[in-house]
Amino acid sequence: MLVLRQFFLVFSFLFIYVIGIFSGCENQGANTLQCLRSAPSKALIRAGNLITAAASSTLFLFAPVLGGQFLQERPIEAFTAGRFSSVPMLAG
C-alpha cells in the first residue's frame, strides 16, 4: 500500500508539472499552483486535452487517491460492499 501511495504522489507531482508546462506555468517553483489558479481556462483545457491525448489509456489517468480522511477505501471496494449512498445519478 505504501508503494502505491508513493506512486500516486510522484504521479500527482508529475501531472502538475506537465499541466504547468502546457498551460504556461513552467519554471514557477513554489508559485506554480498560484499560476495555475490564475491561468486562463482555455489554457488549462488545452493542457488537459494534450495530456489525455498523449495517454495510451485513460483508465488510470484520473483516479481517486486514498488519504485516510476523505477516502478511506477504494471506491470499487466500497461499492461492492454496499457502502455507498443510494442517490439518483446521471452519467454520460
Image (spheres, helix red, strand yellow):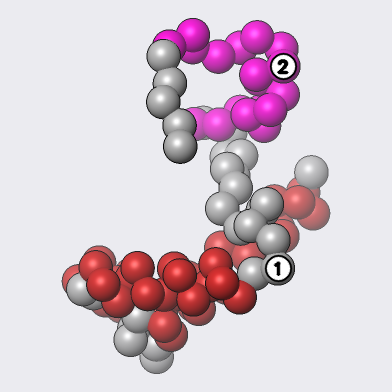
Q: Is residue 9 magenta?
A: no
Give residue 31's position: percent from left, percent from top. Answer: 31, 78
Q: Find residue 64 and report its horizontal and vertical position in percent.
A: 57, 43
Indicate the quadrant containing the N terminus: top left, top right, bottom left or bottom right: top right
Q: Where is residue 2 in the image (x, y as percent from the top left)?
A: 77, 49
Instruction: Say the numbered circle drawn on residue 80.
Output: 2
Q: In which quadrant of the rendered image does the C terminus lie?
A: top left
Identity of the residue drawn at 21% across and 73% down: 40
Residue 31 appears left or right of 79: left
Tell me, for residue 56, which label it has, or none.
1
Q: Mark 1 or mark 2: which is in front?
A: 1
| Residue 50 versus residue 28 in the image, above or below | above
- The residue at 68%/52% (across/down) is 59
Considering every residue shown, the one lying at the far front of the view is: 92
Quadrant hosting residue 47: bottom left
Q: Give the range drawn in magenta.
A: 70-87
Going by the numbered disc 2, the residue's amino acid type is: Thr
